[in-house]
Image: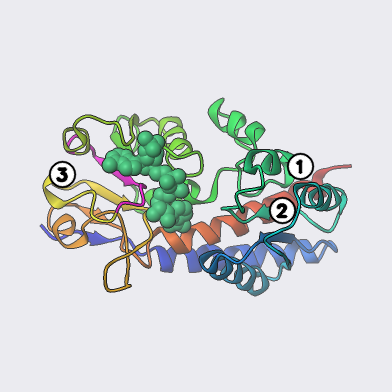
Amino acid sequence: MTARIIDGKALATKIRHEVAQRVLALQAQSIQPGLTVVLVGDDPASHVYVRNKALACEAAGFKSDVLRLSSDTSETDLLALIHQLNQDDTVHGILVQLPLPAHLDQHKVIETIAADKDVDGFHVSNAGLLMTGQPLFRPCTPYGVMKMLESEQVELRGAEAVVVGASNIVGKPMAMLLLAAGATVTLCNSKTRDLAAQTRRADVLVVATGRPGIVTGDMIKPGAVVIDVGINRNSDGKLCGDVEFDSAAAVAGAITPVPGGVGPMTIAMLLVNTLEAAERRLQQP
Ligand code: NDP
């Protein structure tokens, strides 16, 4: 069997086009969605991610600001800046690019962002709303995965879904979204005793560990839908996922590539979350 390739780039382009149309409708009511990204320090990968987010915002017609702060920025100054953005009516979404330099308390920083501007969906109140089935902002990467499954018309009700990786930003919210869609969910972490025994049961397998090649074709149920969230560099410096693509594609029914799979969807869903924050503002008195 050779798997169907799930084209995240094409789907993201379609979603971004729809976002741009909804922006025009908002602009007609004198509202321009605004996203402010705060970047602290010199992490090269973070600079690339932030630049891509800013370009996507501008292409969709958003007001986009990137605040670049030096790596020795104090926590007091960073929190004061976030308080200021919380009060700014032209800012609908605030995103603090992670990881932060070690002297900054990531948890405290995220909790300072107003929950109704937390377009990453990482604030504890947004995590709680997701867990209790009333999501305000769904974290962008798992939200993008759900959109991909929807576009592929994957039946999630009653499906066995296995998520490998249990981080707060990908694995855990992914499990919550799959559960809410009616799947029976298994969430694996680095202590999982027999990973292959878990993954082989999966009708839908989502892998988000940051360990290249952790899932190979022999660990996949024939015909399964495989979503590879991982973004890594192999020994040749090329981008690769967590799934060994060639052996997996020979067994799976459908699979996402890296690059061109989940990555573009993450940015598209950031735009959706920011747009919806602006639309909600319009509905407020
Ligand atoms: P984290 O490092 O925060 O979490 C990794 C998770 O994987 C942990 O829960 C860890 O378990 C688990 N894990 C590690 N080794 C194993 C193993 N051998 N077996 C089972 N589970 C294991 O990573 P993130 O969630 O932030 O990111 C994961 C990957 O996704 C990375 O490659 C990252 O670059 C990529 N990513 C891609 C995005 C995109 O847009 N496509 C967006 C965000 C991330 P434990 O909890 O026990 O430590």
Q: Earlier in the sequence, mark 1 or mark 3?
A: 1
Q: Nearer the viewer, residue 172 or 4?
A: 172
- Give the alpha-carbon distance from disc 1 to disc 2, as whole Å: 8 Å
**Secondary structure under badge 1?**
loop
| Residue under pointer 3 | 219
The C terminus: image quadrant: top right
Q: Residue furthest top?
A: 132
* Left or right of residue 68, residue 247 in this image: left
- Give the alpha-carbon distance from disc 2 to disc 3, as whole Å: 39 Å
- Residue 146, label in figure: none
**Secondary structure under badge 2?**
strand
Dot 2 alpha-carbon crowd within 10 angstroms: few under 14, some 14 to 19, many 20 or more: many
Q: Please name the residue shown 75% across and 46% down the image.
A: 280
Q: Please name the residue shown 56% across and 53% down the image.
A: 99
Q: Residue 90: percent from the left, percent from the top?
A: 84, 58
Are discs 1 and 2 less than 8 Å apart at CB?
yes
Q: Quadrant location of residue 139?
A: top right
What segment carries the magenta color? 200-211
The amino acid beneath tag 3 is Met
| Residue under pointer 2 | 94
Are discs 1 and 3 less than 8 Å apart at CB?
no
| Residue under pointer 1 | 114
The amino acid beneath tag 2 is Ile
